[in-house]
Image (cartoon, coloured by chain):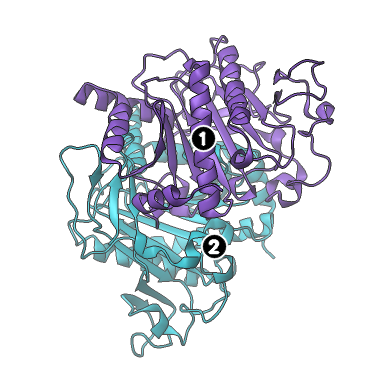
Chain colours: A cyan, B purple
């Protein structure tokens, strides 16, 4: 069984998941990418496990005919059957293995990618993220959603069929808690959401805006950690992604697709990760503002950056903004 | 010129260093590793820049005959000629580019590696780290030392000649500040250094001790983020590495060498990073306890772990302890 463990010094929580270890997994799974029969392809639904959610015009569950499909992770890091308890004291704290770990299969096509999908196809992916969060948030034990999409082996993907992963945790992890606390302090100081202030300032200075419309904006992060780190934010204040409306998802999908296409052109199809940052479950009133961080993964993570220490980025955000603005999609 | 930038939301500081960008650098520098004339090899001292420090029995500076040599980074992320100022307010804060960025060339031999070096050779590396810190700490503007060694392209190394990097910063970065604050809180709660408590507890339970002697201990981290994450700590309380004495360096070098050799045997010569965590400059009395974290880099960093979020480790620290204890060096 997996277990959550808390570092006795920093308080950082990790998931120790021996179930996820298979012989080949300890090493870089180069051979796994695209090799063999893909469990995420249409027609091979039986290989991926029973679907939790799907978008399909009709027909039977777990059969062809879907556009997006959500299944349990085959080797879940956490399970809803697990337990969770915050220990009161002690150096070495294990907290159980409660949570959820699901996979969003984003397309029936093996070689689909966001840069070439339609805005409607991307919208269905965002729809699946939101719907799964709305379902899981009814479980009062779950506190945080982490959503990640890794594209390419260099970004940590072990399958190249387009997919994303949703992890639901029974606690607020340190990095999110710190982000929330920082945003709250800044809101108390200035009287408004710091994300809203950043969006307004970026739009009016126009120094790092890649693209925008009435509802969304894509910017090169002011303190970008890697070349071409790009954030997508809703212009309207909203703490939690799962509170987004249908029309909003449509606008976000268009902004996401446009941004990924620009990155694809500017960087020649780079590996990348997408991270969703959203307020903890049930904290819609938190001083937070959900957003997506798109991180091209052009080089391996060196030791300095590895533990969150210091990132050295050789491309200024202003330069990446210029390059992305020029990156017109044919 | 490089500049330090602070993220308007999290307060995280990054180094934007356009000087470090060369055409090939945006992409994984696979061709750089070991290709061409190595600037760190004996006989090619003129390619690496004038030495700041060297261990040599005699002879001229910047000529053959040395065991360890320290030079400025050819593309420094920060410079002592830079400026630094903490701005008082504003969303988008740039803080100048003050600091130091040096390279420790750990051996005249291109194919040397810690796993095959003698304890005396490893000691000279640690000696160079300490001596450079002792020299740089006289510059009252510098607050933090970050020391990292990356081995192998998958660990972010761009040269395979054995080397490490010393970065001196004019501020305390967020992750170290958080670690210090957490250690201080725990010390206030229990009346003693939390690192000392961990060392004592690990030694008495003997569950995660890889090896130890009177002065040092190597343990599998209780909340290891990656398989075989191993920490080396001095058993005696000491906040700052640069306060270590000569005899202590000898004991640490032996523990480091033994640990790296065990990892080499158990994991078949893995890529790895070594991070030195030490108290800020001039804070010898801080609630901290310097240590080394050795991180095998067996798989690319996925998006979930990338931003310090959540690490999923498929090898329990107890299992890696057993494997490392068995990994007897021939």
Judged from the image, the secondary structure of the residue bearing numbered disc 2 is helix
Measured as percent of width and height from the top left, residue B240 is found at: 45, 19
Judged from the image, the secondary structure of the residue bearing numbered disc 1 is helix
Q: Nearer the viewer, residue B195 or B118?
A: B118
In this rendering, the answer to whether B164 lies above or below A226 is above
Q: Within 10 angstroms of label 1, few (less than 14), some, or many (20 or more) residues?
A: many
Q: Which mark is residue A242?
A: none
Report if residue B13 is visible in the image: no
Name the residue furthest front. B330
Q: Nearer the viewer, residue B169 or B233?
A: B233
Tag 1 residue:
B256
Q: Within 10 angstroms of label 2, few (less than 14), some, or many (20 or more) residues?
A: many
Residue drawn at (29%, 47%) of the image: A5
Tag 2 residue:
A257
Tag in front: 2 or 1: 1
Mark 1, chain letter? Answer: B
Left or right of B73 in this view: B280? left
Measured as percent of width and height from the top left, residue B84 is found at: 57, 17
Residue drawn at (53%, 17%) of the image: B246
Q: Nearer the viewer, residue A296 or A231?
A: A296
Quarter of the N terminus of chain B within the rendering = top right
Report if residue A271 is visible in the image: yes
Total numbered circles: 2
Q: Nearer the viewer, residue A225 or A192?
A: A225
Marks 2 and 1, how far apart in space?
48 Å
Measured as percent of width and height from the top left, residue A161 is found at: 52, 72
Measured as percent of width and height from the top left, residue A240 is found at: 32, 52
Mark 2, chain letter? Answer: A
- Quarter of the rendering containing residue B141: top right
In this rendering, the answer to whether A51 lies above or below A222 is below
């Amino acid at each position: 069984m997996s277990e959550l463990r808390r570092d006795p010094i920093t308080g950082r929580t990790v998931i120790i998941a021996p179930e996820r270890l298979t012989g080949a997994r300890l090493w870089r799974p180069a051979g796994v990418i695209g090799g063999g029969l893909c469990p995420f392809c249409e027609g091979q639904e039986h290989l991926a496990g029973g679907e939790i959610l799907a978008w399909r015009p009709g027909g039977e569950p777990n059969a062809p005919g879907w556009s997006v499909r959500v299944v349990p992770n085959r080797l879940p890091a956490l399970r809803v059957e697990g337990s969770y308890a915050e220990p009161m004291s002690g150096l070495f704290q294990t907290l159980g293995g409660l949570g959820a770990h699901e996979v969003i299969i984003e397309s029936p096509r093996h070689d689909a990618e966001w840069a070439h999908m339609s805005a409607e196809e991307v919208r269905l992916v965002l729809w699946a993220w939101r719907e799964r969060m709305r379902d899981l948030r009814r479980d009062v034990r779950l506190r945080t959603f982490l959503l990640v999409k890794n594209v390419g082996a260099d970004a940590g993907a072990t399958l190249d069929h387009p997919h994303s992963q949703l992890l639901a945790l029974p606690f607020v992890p340190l990095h999110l808690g710190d982000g929330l606390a920082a945003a709250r302090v800044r809101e108390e100081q200035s009287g408004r959401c710091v994300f809203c202030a950043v969006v307004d300032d970026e739009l009016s200075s126009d120094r790092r805006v890649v693209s925008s419309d009435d509802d969304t904006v894509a910017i090169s992060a002011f303190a970008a950690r890697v070349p071409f780190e790009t954030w997508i934010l809703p212009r309207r204040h909203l703490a939690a992604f799962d509170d987004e409306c249908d029309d909003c998802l449509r606008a976000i999908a268009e902004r996401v697709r446009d941004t990924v296409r620009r990155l694809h052109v500017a960087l020649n199809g780079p590996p990348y990760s997408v991270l969703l940052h959203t307020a903890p479950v049930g904290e819609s009133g938190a001083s937070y503002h959900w957003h997506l961080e798109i991180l091209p993964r052009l080089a391996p993570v060196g030791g300095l950056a590895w533990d969150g220490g210091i990132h050295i980025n050789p491309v200024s955000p202003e330069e990446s903004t210029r390059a992305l603005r020029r990156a017109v999609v044919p």
